[in-house]
Image (spheres, helix red, strand yellow):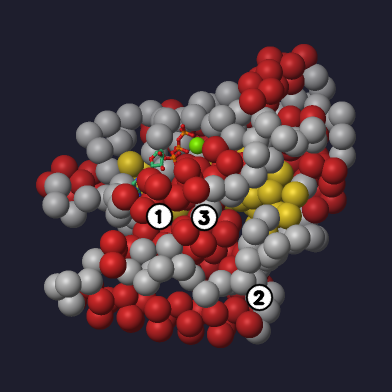
Amino acid sequence: MSKIIAVVNQKGGVGKTTTSVNLATNLAYLRHETLLIDLDPQSNATSGLGIDKNANPSHIYRALLGEVPLKEVLLPTAIDWLDIAPSHIDLIGAELELVSMQEREMRLKNILTPFLDVYKYIIIDCPPSLGLLTLNALVAADSVLIPIQCEYYALEGLGQLVKTIELLRENLNPNLEIEGILLTMYDSRMNLSKQVVEEIKKHFGDKVYTTMIPRTVRLAEAPSFGKPMILYDKSAKGTLAYLKLTKELLSKQPKNIQLQSAPEAAAEIQLIKVEENNRLQAEQSPIQNEQTAPEQPALEVKTN
Ligand code: ATP
Ligand code: MG
């Protein structure tokens, strides 16, 4: 059975897409069959993986409306073990068109059912609203990952999101859980970042991941190259932070999900540990920084 994680925060620009793309990529990198669903008409997760967001005649919108089967929408990516259901700007019409349809909140859940034995993880990148698209994600999901930007208005709107999750638990999705709260764009030089972290921890306790995502130039650059961090700069701080997050998330999964992982995953995790150690050593050296980090990752990229 798949674990379906919706990445949600109705606040814009908090790192939902960056988190969805890099979490999905890293899960695949660790040999978990993963599907990334781009449920945002902005299609940033689609283009962030180097896929032309205007070139796909089949996209998630058409599958939601029942015009094409989801199978026809799925595309392979440059990362083995990772597929994507691309988005399209037309998805903006879905909010309106779905309103009059039967079971309008259940459509994503229904089309995903045949794929629950195909993928181990399904990550859904949601738009910055609590409209019908996000509702579909929350009905389909087992859990919600909430990225929160370390800034002054971080807590704004969170009450509404938590209330929405509680309402869903009472009605449409009784088993919906909060997977975790991820602090993004953390800047250790700013007292404000530290204050936000304290405040969020007061509210959400151990739901807050110990891994925080730093604000880095590399993370901001990667989408314009259409690459997830692990292909863009394997040893950058942001890459390692998202790898650490992925491992933290995996460590919190029930045993039966973890045990399904292929034996190769253990070797990969070992490799990542070595890379992290190298990274820490490099950080202690005053001359090496992100700019001087080794060039490209020795990763195999699919060409077909
Ligand atoms: P939206 O609500 O519009 O969908 P979002 O929540 O998906 O936005 P992102 O698109 O992931 O947010 O990030 C917003 C912007 O901040 C993007 O330009 C992204 O490249 C950049 N960004 C995300 N995370 C970081 C980070 N840790 N450091 C620096 N820049 C970042
Ligand atoms: Mg986004």
For image coordinates 77% across by 14% down, the residue present is: 100
Type of amino acid at the residue the image marks with label 2:
Ser
Residue found at x 80% / y 60%: 117
Q: CA distance from mark 2 to mark 1?
A: 24 Å
Q: Secondary structure at mark 1?
A: helix
Residue to which mark 3 is pinned: 228
Q: Which residue is mark 2?
A: 261
* CB of mark 1 near ligand 1 (< 8 Å): no
- Residue under the image location 42 percent in, 43 percent down: 15
Task: Return the disc, 3 or 1, that comes first in the chain's sequence.
Answer: 1
Image coordinates of residue 206 in percent, x first then y, are 36, 58
Foreground residue among 36 and 234: 234
Name the front one of labels 3 and 2. Answer: 3
Of labels 2 and 1, earlier in sequence is 1
Seen from the viewer's position, the closer of residues 71 and 298 is: 298
Number of residues whose C-alpha sits closer than 10 Å to that of mark 2, classed few (under 14), some (14–19) or many (20 or more):
some
Q: Is residue 116 placed above or below 220 in the rendered structure?
A: below
Query: Which of the two marks, 2 or 1, is nearer to us in this view?
Result: 2
Please state, as top left, top right, bottom left or bottom right, where the N terminus lies in the image: bottom right
In screen coordinates, is 215 left or right of 104? left
Q: Position of residue 114 (x, y in %)?
A: 84, 51
Q: CA distance from mark 3 to mark 1?
A: 26 Å
Q: Would residue 284 be visible to someone looking at this image?
A: yes
In this view, 228 is above or below 144: below
State yes or no: discs 3 and 2 in contact (Cβ < 8 Å): no
Numbered label attached to residue 191 = none
- Identified by mark 1, the residue type is Lys
Q: Secondary structure at mark 2?
A: loop
Tag 1 residue: 207
> Which mark lies nearer to you, 3 or 1?
3
Marks 3 and 2 sit apart, C-alpha to C-alpha, by: 22 Å
